[in-house]
Image (tube, helix red, strand yellow):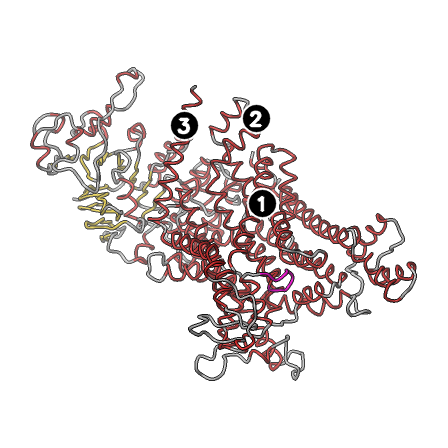
């Protein structure tokens, strides 16, 4: 019975995941193909005007570029578009003809995942430790300071934090004559002179280049974790089962990990996934600010250059990544909180 | 020879509030005998829960122990003051010697872990060297004793059990280390009458079998009559009367005890005649002069509003009143 | 007759309650009050600045990128225009845009959420599912992609943002309405066979005012984020606001010229202040309307 409801819960979530990706795919198809003066029609017109070629030939060119069968009925086009998306085939970039969209994504995505992931992870760890600590030190003088700083961090947009960090690390000299980090030489993902690979020089260089984006992601998320963890630990501390655990004479360390920690973490886990989508969105601006060659900057360049296949590919991959993370968080939540299963299968409690 | 196992001596506890300190318990003294069952009764806010929780050291942050001792006579005869123990010393005594169960035992189990893990870690926190199998074996016996199906309960999550089942499971858990004192804070509120009755019968059974001392807090005088050997009446943070259970019901000395007894609805009284004690409990921050009960007392006179009555000790009972049972001292 | 007396009672009671809550907010929530003062200052500045601190329309080549001086307290920009005047005038558009967007977004979310909760059943389930789906689509990248297909300006952005934010408000309004629906007086209204819109507008919405106010400030905040973000990326036409100043300061390479850092720093700080004031006010409102949160 329990197993059954868990299964149903998971199936529902998988369905939601697929449905979401389908909605986004369809949305993109409508934008590219069906809107009045959509990019495909415009491209054909442009080709006809610029090169003075006929409609058929221009359509052929567009066909290979957008990887669409433009002379088929729209429904057939839609189905073959869906098929291509399933096979991760987004056609070729308009700006750099001959280059697969997927290969551009494959080259850029790891850098964004690296900076966003490291930033999120470090903020998560620091935030949870600080948040738990603040819950226990509610009566100390420094608690309002930490919480105030946390609510400041959580309120202001990430790109403004990036500007502050940039000013502190890369612009102000604080009377020493040089900035903390040589910001101008840190454009891009790594220096020209290092050889990529698992050597210390390269790893150090990559970390230095990624430092400001990582710090930005970290600080922009830190406040939320501190506040959430403080709140959820405080409310867990007041529960009966924690009180009883004390009366049972359990060791403080057992109570902290198995009783307070596990329950206080529950609401944080779902938030983690929600945040991820938000940061990936923010990476657009952050990567532009620090000239960091990740997927966000690539999407921006694609948009500015009206490189529709690339835009569509990146956006779909971004959405899929976020949807997948949401799904994983939901699965993790079921693993961590046994009560969820019953809500999925409602009747199981009867 | 003295026979007490737990002795409250002049216990005073206050809460810090915005208006000032609220005297929740003041100079409360009473004893709990070896194997005795003591009922703590009184209206809400009279300090009975505060004094009980102070024994196990889980008072809220705003509470402060102003004075007094809770003396506990250990198994080896030595005496420990629960208030001056270090956190570690207290931790060792908790659940092994003294257990406490709360009003809201519905949520006493960690919701994200199965029941058996909570039996395991309780034992492991106190007795090293016991295998999981031994502990589970013992848990099974206890669960059977409280008439539960051990295999089902042990591997369930708390939310999969009903309220009554959780209560009985917790009861089984309290006995796992053979404690010497069991403190129950309103053990049966929030349960339906039939479950209540079951729990009471179980408690009596277990007392006979394990011979622990029992302190329980209740509003319900019918439970007192079924379970208690001795009744401690508290009013506004003070112990106003202690008496053996039979004497309490037949011949209460303090007017407040008398009032509580009269307020019990009986089938033979019509609802019009139902008695209730007039007035409200006094303000515990700005307390009235003299006897705290005098504004509500039928026998109140000039002396009552001026002086606070001392505690008078008789052979097996005590009271704090100038007019015990309505007469003169 | 009986209904009439009930109404007057409740409305006078409501005013009294609102006053009490305002008093509580000012006395007990100093941070919220500071937020309120900041917002008030920005609003007043936005209103008077066209007359008091007019923006320089002409550039002054002799005064390009000057540091702070007596004449220009925050220095000048790359065209030699006074920065303080731009700061004073730069909040108006943001405030207006975020206010209108929030209003529009609330309207959509509240209508959908309230009716979905009241109607219930399959309709509600489908709406909730759609909202869930919608929420997992990354919003800012979607905006950027949109801007590749349409030319956005502030008016269209306002509408797009309001439409995009329906799901979040829908979900919170829906759950609020569901919990209010359970309360006795709503059940009584249903038993009296009052019409659905009547119940939603007259009975349910008034009880959600606090909650709506909080969400309103949140929506304003996210609008400012999107607007400033898009302006910074150069995807919106450049008008007169703080986001544009950041964009221009950035593209003019102000960071390599620490003397004129105010060109970048001042609008950044102003946006922070505006957003902080909104968040603080939102928190204060939450406390005021939800007595259970009071210490």
Task: Identify the residue at image location x=40%, y=54%.
Answer: C37
- Decide which of A7, C241 is in the foreground and name it: C241
Q: Position of residue A338 (x, y in %)?
A: 55, 46
The residue depicted at 85 percent of the width and 61 percent of the height is A62
Mark found first going from the N terminus, 2 or 3? 3
Q: Is residue C166 left or right of residue B18?
A: right
Q: Which mark is residue C104?
A: 1
Q: In the rendered structure, which segment of residues is drawn in magenta?
A: C232-239
Q: Which mark is residue C8?
A: 3
Chain of residue at mark 1: C
Task: Tell me which numbered mark, 1 or 2, is placed earlier along the sequence.
Answer: 1
- Gap in angstroms between the C-alphas marked 1 and 2: 25 Å
Residue placed under numbered mark 2 in the picture: C195
Count of labels shown? 3
Quadrant assignment for the N terminus of chain C: top left
Q: Position of residue A198 (x, y in %)?
A: 64, 78
Badge 1 element: helix
Q: Position of residue C64 (x, y in %)?
A: 54, 76
> Would you say the residues marked 1 and 2 are in contact, meaning their CB atoms lie under 8 Å apart?
no
Label 2 close to label 3 by CB (< 8 Å): no
Nearest to the eye among marks 1 and 2: give it.
1
């Amino acid at each position: 019975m329990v197993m059954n409801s868990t299964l149903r819960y998971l199936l529902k979530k998988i369905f939601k995941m697929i449905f979401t990706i389908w909605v986004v795919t369809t949305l993109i198809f409508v934008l590219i193909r069906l809107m009045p003066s959509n990019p495909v029609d415009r491209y054909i017109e442009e080709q006809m005007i610029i090169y003075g070629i006929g409609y058929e030939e221009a359509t052929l060119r567009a066909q290979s570029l957008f990887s669409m069968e433009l002379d088929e009925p729209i429904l057939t086009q839609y189905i073959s578009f869906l098929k291509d998306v399933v096979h991760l085939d987004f056609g070729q970039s308009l700006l750099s003809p001959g280059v697969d969209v997927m290969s551009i994504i494959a080259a850029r995505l790891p850098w964004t995942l690296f900076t966003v992931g490291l930033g999120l992870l470090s903020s998560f760890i620091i935030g949870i430790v600080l948040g738990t600590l603040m819950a226990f030190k509610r009566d100390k003088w420094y608690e309002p300071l930490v919480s105030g700083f946390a609510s400041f961090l959580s309120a202001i947009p990430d790109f403004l934090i990036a500007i502050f960090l940039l000013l502190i690390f890369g612009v102000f000299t604080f009377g020493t004559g040089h900035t903390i980090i040589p910001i101008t030489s840190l454009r891009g993902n790594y220096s020209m002179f290092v050889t990529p690979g698992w050597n210390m020089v390269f790893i150090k260089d990559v970390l230095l280049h990624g430092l400001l984006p990582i710090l930005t992601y970290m600080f922009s998320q830190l406040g939320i974790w501190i506040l959430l963890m403080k709140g959820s630990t405080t409310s867990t501390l007041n529960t009966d089962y924690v009180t009883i655990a004390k009366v049972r004479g359990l060791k403080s360390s057992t109570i902290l990990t198995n009783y307070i920690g596990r329950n206080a973490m529950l609401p944080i886990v779902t938030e983690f996934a929600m945040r991820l989508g938000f940061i990936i969105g923010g990476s657009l601006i952050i990567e532009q600010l620090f000239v960091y060659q990740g997927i966000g900057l690539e999407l921006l360049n694609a948009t500015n250059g009206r490189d529709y296949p690339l835009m569509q590919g990146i956006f779909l991959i971004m959405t899929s990544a976020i949807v997948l993370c949401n799904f994983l968080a939901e699965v993790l939540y079921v693993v961590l909180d046994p009560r969820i299963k019953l809500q999925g299968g409602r009747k199981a409690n009867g | 020879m003295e026979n007490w196992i737990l002795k409250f001596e002049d216990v005073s506890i206050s809460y810090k509030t915005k208006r000032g300190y609220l005297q929740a318990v003041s100079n409360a003294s009473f004893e709990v005998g070896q194997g005795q069952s003591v009922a703590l009764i009184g209206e809400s806010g009279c300090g009975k829960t505060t004094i009980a929780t102070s024994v196990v050291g889980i008072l809220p942050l705003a509470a402060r122990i102003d004075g007094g001792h809770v003396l506990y006579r250990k198994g080896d005869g030595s005496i420990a003051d629960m208030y001056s123990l270090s956190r570690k010393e207290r931790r060792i005594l908790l659940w092994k010697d003294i257990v406490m169960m709360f009003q809201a035992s519905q949520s006493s189990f960690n919701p994200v872990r199965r029941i058996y893990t909570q039996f395991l870690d309780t034992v492991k926190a106190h007795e090293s060297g016991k295998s999981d199998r031994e502990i589970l074996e013992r848990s099974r016996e206890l669960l059977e004793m409280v008439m539960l199906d051990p295999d089902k309960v042990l591997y369930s999550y708390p939310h999969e059990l009903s309220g009554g089942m959780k209560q009985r499971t917790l009861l089984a858990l309290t006995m796992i280390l053979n404690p010497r004192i069991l403190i129950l804070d309103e053990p049966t509120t929030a349960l339906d009458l039939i479950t209540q009755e079951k729990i009471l019968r179980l408690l009596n059974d277990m007392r006979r079998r394990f011979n622990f001392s029992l302190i329980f807090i209740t509003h319900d005088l019918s439970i007192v009559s079924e379970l208690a050997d001795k009744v401690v009446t508290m009013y506004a943070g003070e112990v106003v009367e202690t008496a053996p259970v039979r004497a309490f019901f037949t011949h209460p000395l303090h007017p407040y005890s008398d009032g509580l007894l009269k307020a019990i609805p009986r089938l033979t009284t019509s609802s019009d005649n139902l008695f209730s004690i007039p007035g409200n409990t006094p303000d515990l921050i700005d307390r009235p002069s003299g006897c705290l009960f005098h504004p509500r007392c039928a026998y109140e006179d000039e002396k009552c509003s001026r002086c606070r009555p001392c505690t008078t000790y008789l052979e097996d009972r005590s009271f704090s009143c100038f007019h015990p049972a309505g007469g003169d001292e | 007759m009986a209904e009439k007396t009930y109404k007057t009672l409740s409305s006078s009671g409501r005013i009294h309650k609102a006053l009490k809550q305002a008093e509580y907010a000012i006395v007990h929530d100093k941070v919220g009050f500071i937020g309120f003062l900041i917002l008030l200052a920005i609003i007043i500045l936005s209103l008077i600045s066209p007359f008091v601190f007019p923006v320089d329309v002409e550039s002054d080549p002799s005064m390009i990128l000057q540091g702070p001086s007596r004449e220009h307290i925050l220095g000048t920009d790359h065209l030699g225009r006074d920065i303080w005047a731009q700061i004073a005038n730069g909040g108006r558009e943001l405030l207006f845009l975020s206010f209108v967007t929030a209003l529009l977004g609330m309207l959509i979310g509240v209508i959908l959420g309230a009716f979905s909760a009241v109607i219930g059943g399959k309709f509600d389930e489908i709406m909730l599912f759609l909202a869930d789906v919608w929420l997992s689509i990354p919003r800012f990248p979607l905006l950027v992609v949109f801007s590749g297909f349409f030319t956005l300006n502030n008016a269209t952005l306002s509408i797009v943002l309001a439409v995009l934010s329906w799901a979040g408000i829908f979900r919170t309004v829906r759950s609020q309405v569901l919990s209010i629906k359970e309360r006795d007086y709503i059940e009584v209204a249903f038993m009296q066979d009052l019409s659905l819109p009547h119940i939603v507008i007259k009975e349910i919405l008034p009880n959600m005012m606090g909650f709506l106010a909080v969400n309103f400030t949140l929506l304003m905040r996210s609008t400012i984020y999107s607007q400033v973000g898009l302006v910074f990326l150069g995807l919106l036409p450049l008008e007169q606001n703080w986001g544009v100043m950041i964009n221009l300061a950035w593209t003019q390479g102000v960071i390599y010229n620490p003397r004129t850092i105010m060109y970048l720093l001042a609008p950044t700080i102003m946006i922070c202040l505006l957003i902080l004031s909104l968040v603080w006010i939102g928190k204060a409102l939450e406390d005021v309307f939800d007595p259970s949160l009071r210490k």
